[in-house]
Amino acid sequence: MLNIAHRGFKGAYPENTMLAYEKAVEIGADGIEFDVHLTKDGELVIIHDESLDRTTDGKGLVKDKTLHELKKLNASKGSLTSEVQTIPTLREYFDFAKNKDIITNIELKTSIITYEGIEKKVYDLIKEYDMKDKIIISSFNHNSLIRMKEIDREIKCGVLESSRLYKPWEYVKNLGMEYFHPLNFTINKEIAEKFSENNIGLNIWFGISDYDFGECLEFNPTGLITDFPDRIKEIIAKKI
């Protein structure tokens, strides 16, 4: 079972910062999940929200700012324990991850804002760094996943979902995707078994509430995507 750090080690460090990614690797995470947007000048940057207000000292939308403007912001807003962090670019992350034995889950944030051509830009950078075998592309906008598959059928994709789909294994199979990324409380043992029968990976993610992650072990998931890779490491160790 993969221990995937949600927005890096979000439970202890400012989310979607290089510090959070570094600490996730230090703690022994198998993978890192994060969110990608496009700047006004077409650069790929990592931040969760479409808006800058929650996680930075900036205001407005990511899409309306240049990379130069975004790099002036503090991306560790509210943190009392870390030094000032900047918004990372996808290139900066790849420079960090390229020689590490970790899986990278890139979420394309195209559900609210249509970032024209973001799929090709992300794919081209993946190819440049020769990291295709270490990448999972996910999105709540399943059209983005289809566009990624049209670029390269071999790139692995995960269908992100927070609702209770009817026969979700059939939906994911029909889309031709390798993974399903459901919110934890939408999954039960029967659904998990159907995904296993159809050879579709199951990477379960969690919201902001404090969950007992061990309850999901009976589903035999491919991975757990959480804010606390340290806790998941302990759970996996006990299971072994």
Image: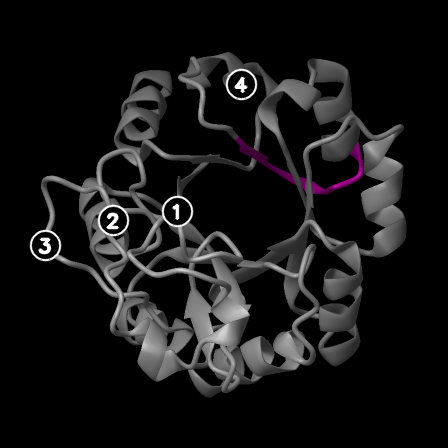
| Distance from the alpha carbon under mark 3 to that under mark 1 | 18 Å
Whether residue 201 appears in magenta in the rendering, the answer is yes
Residue for badge 3 = 83
Residue for badge 1 = 54
Q: Depth-wise, is mark 3 or mark 4 nearer the camera?
A: 3
Q: x%, y% of residue 201?
A: 65, 41
- Asked which secondary structure carries label 2, the reply is loop
Q: Residue furthest front?
A: 59
Residue for badge 2 = 77
Task: Name the N-terminal-most of marks 2 and 1.
Answer: 1
Task: Name the N-terminal-most of marks 1 and 4.
Answer: 1
| Distance from the alpha carbon under mark 2 to that under mark 3 | 10 Å
User: Can residue 63 be seen here?
Assistant: yes
| Distance from the alpha carbon under mark 3 to that under mark 4 | 35 Å
Residue type at mark 2 is Lys
- Asked which secondary structure carries label 3, the reply is loop
**The magenta stretch spans which residues?**
197-205
* Residue drawn at 45 percent across, 76 percent down: 65
Residue nearer the viewer, 231 or 15: 15
